[in-house]
């Protein structure tokens, strides 16, 4: 089955992320000066405005910060509805927006804020693996 969702464009400042994703690694940008991780990748640290950035391999683990059940969607996502989107608190800091897997959108009461999640990557094409997050046992 081929990937039928929009495929992100890879820029020079996001190459390490996509390279890591193709190897099953969650690469995260970190500021060398203030030592904080930020998401999404930028040329300037959003915390201290330093341009002295590096990439680290993240744990691929986090927790649900919040979520929403998407009942109405457009384009290629329409056939997926209902589905769950969530903000993930990364173990290394900052948050990542995702489509949450391993949950039943018809039973949102079963989705717990703070539940542990792990990242997984879905192949979109030979160069692009898209990160999703899945709820796991504590
Ligand atoms: Zn910084």
Image (cartoon, grey):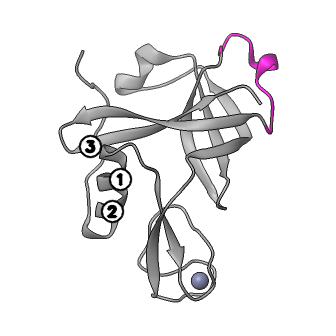
- Neighbor class of circle 2 (other Cα within 10 Å; few <14, some 14-19, many 20+) is many
Mark 3: which secondary structure?
strand
Identify the residue under disc 2.
Answer: 16
Q: Residue furthest top?
A: 106
SS for dot 1 = helix
For the residues bearing labels 2 and 3, Cβ distance under 8 angstroms: no
Say which of marks 3 and 1 sits in front.
1
Cα distance in 3D space between marks 3 and 1: 10 Å
Q: Secondary structure under badge 2? A: helix
Indicate whether residue 74 is drawn in magenta: no
Per the model, the C-alpha gap separating discs 2 and 3 is 12 Å
In the rendered view, tell whether residue 83 sits above or below residue 86. Answer: above
Q: Quadrant of the N terminus?
A: top left
Residue at x 64% of width, y 60% of height: 92
Cβ of mark 1 under 8 A from ligand 1: no
Q: Which residue is painted at 46% across and 80% down in the image? A: 53
The residue range painted magenta reads 104-114
Q: Main secondary structure of the magenta part?
A: loop
Alpha carbon separation for disc pair 2 and 1: 6 Å
Q: Quickly name the residue at label 3.
A: 128
Which residue is identified by label 1? Answer: 20
Write down which quadrant ligand 1 falls in.
bottom right
Badge 1 local density, few (<14 within 10 Å), some, or many (20+)? Answer: some
* Image quadrant where one finds the C terminus: top right
């Amino acid at each position: 089955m081929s990937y039928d969702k929009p495929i992100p464009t890879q820029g020079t400042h996001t190459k390490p992320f996509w390279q890591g994703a193709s190897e099953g690694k969650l690469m995260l940008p970190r500021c060398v000066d203030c030592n904080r991780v930020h998401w999404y990748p930028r040329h300037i640290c959003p915390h201290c405005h330093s341009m002295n950035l590096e990439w680290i391999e993240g744990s691929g683990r986090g927790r649900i910060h919040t979520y929403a059940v998407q009942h109405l969607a457009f384009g290629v996502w329409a056939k997926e509805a209902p589905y769950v989107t969530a903000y993930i608190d990364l173990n290394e800091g900052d948050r990542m927006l995702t489509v949450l897997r391993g949950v039943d959108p018809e039973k949102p009461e079963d989705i717990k804020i703070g539940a542990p999640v792990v990242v997984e990557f879905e192949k979109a094409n030979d160069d692009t693996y898209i990160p999703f997050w899945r709820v796991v046992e504590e």
